Image (spheres, rainbow, N blue to C red):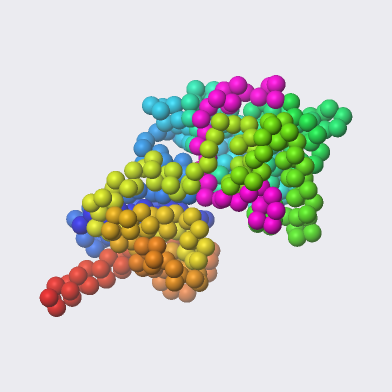
């Protein structure tokens, strides 16, 4: 039997690579002869670098950069030498997981550190950058990243605004003269499953602001700043991009990139599945196992396990998923090729304990599932 194991990460507990190995360990504890092909997945957020490097090879590059609040940290990006390609996760330098909940501050949080990662990749001679947008702590329209690459945002007195953050309404003009010329020409593939536009009730502020610390009574003020920023940017580049799907991704980061870079947006899952040749792996598979931390009705909107199951369905392969938590609204999952969703928690326990024991719980759940699979097969043979 050939089993494709293609999970996303179980956030806060297990990376996608660790999850794939844990699932394989569970199967092999029952039957060591099973062929398990590990193809870790991601949807553009955390884990994208790891999934791509495992899938096609490469190395990790460490950089000293700023975190969302300007503190010095070490962050990594992926480098594929043969293709002169960098794989950058904005979460590595500008992500919400880098902050304590008490530190969430979109008014001051900046994407500057992500720009530093891109700048380092350009210095290495990157001809292409795969940029995962997800898990951001920012609502700065990508201004911080662009500042790190040489763009200057000026206020009404002609002074440059440092670490723009949520002060986008102070920008009255943009100086492009020092923008890194390599940035203008490098090909950027944006991996994101967010299709929200920049503005409005479904935009970057009202949908994603609250999870980054924007209080309900601050949303309108932050939205006014984004509107003002969009006006100045579009006047500078002489094109309208605020209504482009994905322009609202990562606190408007998508908008900033679409304005000043040679880039295009693609579904994070689709891009990573393509890079790791998931479709080819599925052609002769007997079963696909996927999973992530939580599976519920929202999983239908671009989450990796549903992407895996849809692709498996096209190849006539059954898909099963493990989840740390199973929510409501799973009725539509079967139509997407996801035959079975199984929890990994096997007894009452607190969230902190479950997160700590994630790898062991997943391995045990995988073993139970495979034992049940063998039992079902034996019963079918007996009855026939």
Q: Residue at x 44, y 68 (%)?
A: 332
Question: What is the residue that sits farthest to the bottom in this orientation?
Answer: 383
Q: Classify residue 63 as left or right of residue 233.
A: left
Image coordinates of residue 177 in percent, x first then y, are 70, 21
Residue 208 visible within the image: yes
Quadrant assignment, res 108: top right
Residue 346 located within the stretch drawn in magenta: no
Query: As drawn, which residue projects farthest toward the right?
Result: 157
Q: Quadrant of the C terminus?
A: bottom left
Residue 142 visible within the image: no
Q: In which quadrant is the N terminus drawn?
A: bottom left
Q: Which residues are magenta?
A: 176-204
Q: Which one is nearer the viewer's eye here, 229 or 369?
A: 229
Q: Is residue 104 above or below residue 177?
A: below
Relative vertical location of residue 251 with respect to residue 25 in this rendering, above or below? above
Query: For the stretch drawn in magenta, what is the main secondary structure?
Result: loop
Residue 120: quadrant of the picture: top right
Residue at left 29%, top 51%? 282
**Residue 117 at what x, y percent from top left?**
57, 32
In terms of image quadrants, where is residue 34? Answer: bottom left
Q: What x and y, as percent, mark residue 11?
A: 50, 55
Pinpoint residue 13: horizontal percent, then vertical percent: 48, 56
Q: Does the magenta run of residues contain 178?
A: yes
Instruction: Give left or right: position of 345 versus 214.
Output: left
């Amino acid at each position: 039997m050939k089993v494709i194991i293609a999970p996303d990460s179980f956030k806060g507990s297990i990376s996608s690579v660790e999850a794939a190995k844990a699932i394989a360990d569970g199967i092999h504890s029952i039957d060591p002869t099973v062929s398990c092909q590990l193809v870790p997945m991601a949807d553009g957020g955390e884990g994208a670098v790891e999934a791509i490097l495992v899938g096609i090879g490469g190395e990790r590059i460490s950089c000293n950069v700023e975190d969302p609040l300007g503190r010095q940290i070490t962050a990594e990006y992926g480098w594929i030498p043969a293709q002169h390609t960098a794989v950058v996760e904005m979460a590595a330098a500008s992500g919400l997981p880098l902050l304590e909940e008490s530190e969430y501050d979109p008014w001051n949080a900046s994407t500057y550190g992500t720009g530093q990662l891109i700048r380092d990749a350009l210095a290495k001679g990157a001809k292409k950058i795969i940029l995962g947008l997800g898990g951001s702590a920012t609502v700065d329209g990508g201004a911080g990243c662009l500042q790190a690459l040489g763009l200057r945002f000026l206020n009404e007195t002609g002074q440059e605004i440092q670490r723009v953050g949520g002060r986008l309404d102070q920008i009255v003009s943009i100086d492009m003269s020092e923008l890194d010329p390599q940035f203008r020409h490098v090909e950027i593939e944006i991996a994101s499953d967010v299709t929200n536009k920049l503005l409005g009730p479904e935009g970057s502020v009202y949908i994603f602001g609250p999870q980054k610390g924007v209080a309900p009574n601050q949303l309108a003020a932050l939205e006014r700043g984004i509107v003002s920023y969009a006006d100045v940017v579009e006047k500078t580049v002489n094109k309208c991009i605020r209504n482009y799907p994905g322009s609202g991704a990562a606190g408007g980061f998508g908008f900033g990139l679409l304005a000043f870079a040679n880039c295009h947006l693609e579904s994070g899952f689709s891009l990573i599945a393509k890079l790791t040749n998931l479709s080819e792996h599925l052609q002769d598979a007997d079963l696909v196992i996927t999973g992530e931390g939580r599976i519920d009705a929202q999983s239908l909107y671009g989450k990796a396990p549903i992407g895996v199951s849809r692709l498996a369905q096209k190849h006539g392969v059954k898909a099963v998923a493990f989840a740390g938590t199973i929510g409501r609204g799973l009725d539509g999952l079967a139509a997407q090729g996801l035959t079975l969703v199984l929890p990994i928690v096997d007894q009452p326990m607190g969230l902190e304990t479950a997160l700590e024991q994630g790898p062991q719980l997943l391995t045990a759940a995988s073993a139970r599932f495979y034992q049940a699979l063998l039992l079902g097969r034996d019963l079918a043979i007996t009855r026939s």
